Amino acid sequence: DLAFRGSDLHKTYQTGETVVHALRGIDFAVPRSEMLVLLGPSGSGKSTLLNIIGGLDRPTSGKLYYRDTEITALNDRDLTRYRRAEVGFIFQFYNLIPSLTAEENVRLVTDIADSPMAPSEALALVGLEERRNHYPAQLSGGEQQRVAVARAIAKRPGVLLCDEPTGALDSSTGVRVLETLERAHAELGTTVVIITHNVGIAAMAHRVIHFRDGQIGRVEINEKPIEPA
Ligand code: ADP
Ligand code: ADP
């Protein structure tokens, strides 16, 4: 039962005379029930693939399926609809609105989603219900990122896409953020895809896809992913 299936995906950027081959023929499959990590050097194509999976960008060629839908065949309007309904994004720098409380930041999403959780339920899932009236500046970095996780999961997305979600955090705080992703995965059945440089985090994933120069090098399967502490 696959969440994603990609075949021969290419992405070429052209700026003036310069051509960059960000993805050079990628084939991959992501089972629905997995937490998956994309690992590899800077510039190897990880964010490009994440943006394509999330419907923020389109490949130059190749096919991508989400469940039974061919994402690469959707028009712009349906691609936007897919992104709004199915995809939660988490970035390195939280992207919370500083003038809104934790709960108000989550409510931005739940007000427009089809069958969202209550903001308090989403905040409880990440262990921050009692901080719902705090502003971002009153929270630690780890807590701000957990609010961002609550905001992303509140619309019950089919998939959570995380680009360096722990990149700005120390390792024990990062592990706690990972625990919240793991909980979303376990309780909501969300497919989770994480870009990271952190090999400790990679050890918690079911599958690690190694990137190199726009291609997939090897794929590791962790039979027993390390449980977050
Ligand atoms: P990673 O996430 O592994 O660091 P990226 O997917 O961000 O790698 O980048 C892959 C390559 O594509 C890099 O050479 C990068 O400079 C280039 N690239 C990414 N986005 C763009 C863009 N919008 N325009 C031009 N080049 C880009
Ligand atoms: P975490 O491990 O979740 O990042 P910390 O141990 O860094 O949390 O912080 C513990 C408590 O200290 C937090 O609950 C938060 O309320 C407070 N705190 C931490 N950093 C800041 C900060 N930069 N501004 C205000 N409060 C902070």
Image: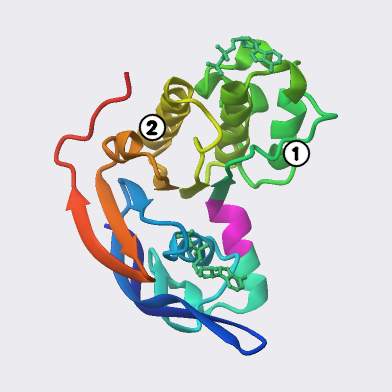
Q: Determine whether, in the image, residue 158 is placed left or right of residue 217.
A: right
Whichever of labels 1 and 2 marks the residue nearer the N terminus, that label is 1
Does 140 appear above or below 63?
above
- Going 59% across and 17% down the picture, which residue do you hit? 128
Specify the label residue 182 is tagged with: 2
Residue 72 in sight: yes
Ligand 2 near label 2 (Cβ, under 8 Å)? Answer: no
Is-magenta flag for residue 142?
no
Residue 2 in sight: no
For the residue marked with disc 1, what is the amino acid?
Leu
For label 1, the residue is 108
- Going 75% across and 39% down the picture, which residue do you hit? 108
Span highlighted in magenta in the image: 81-87
Does 1 appear above or below 25?
above
- Going 46% across and 28% down the picture, which residue do you hit? 174
Of the four image quadrants, the one with ligand 2 is: top right
Location of the N terminus by quadrant is bottom left
Task: Tell me residue 195's x, y (percent).
Answer: 43, 49
**Nearest the eye: 103 or 44:** 44
Which residue ends up furthest to the right in the rendered image?
99
**Nearest the eye: 30 or 216:** 216
Magenta segment, prevailing SS (helix, strand or loop): helix
Q: Determine whether, in the image, residue 107 is placed left or right of residue 14.
A: right
Does 47 appear above or below 144?
below
Which residue ends up furthest to the left in the rendered image?
223
Task: Tell me residue 186's x, y (percent).
Answer: 35, 32
Which residue ends up furthest to the bottom in the rendered image?
17
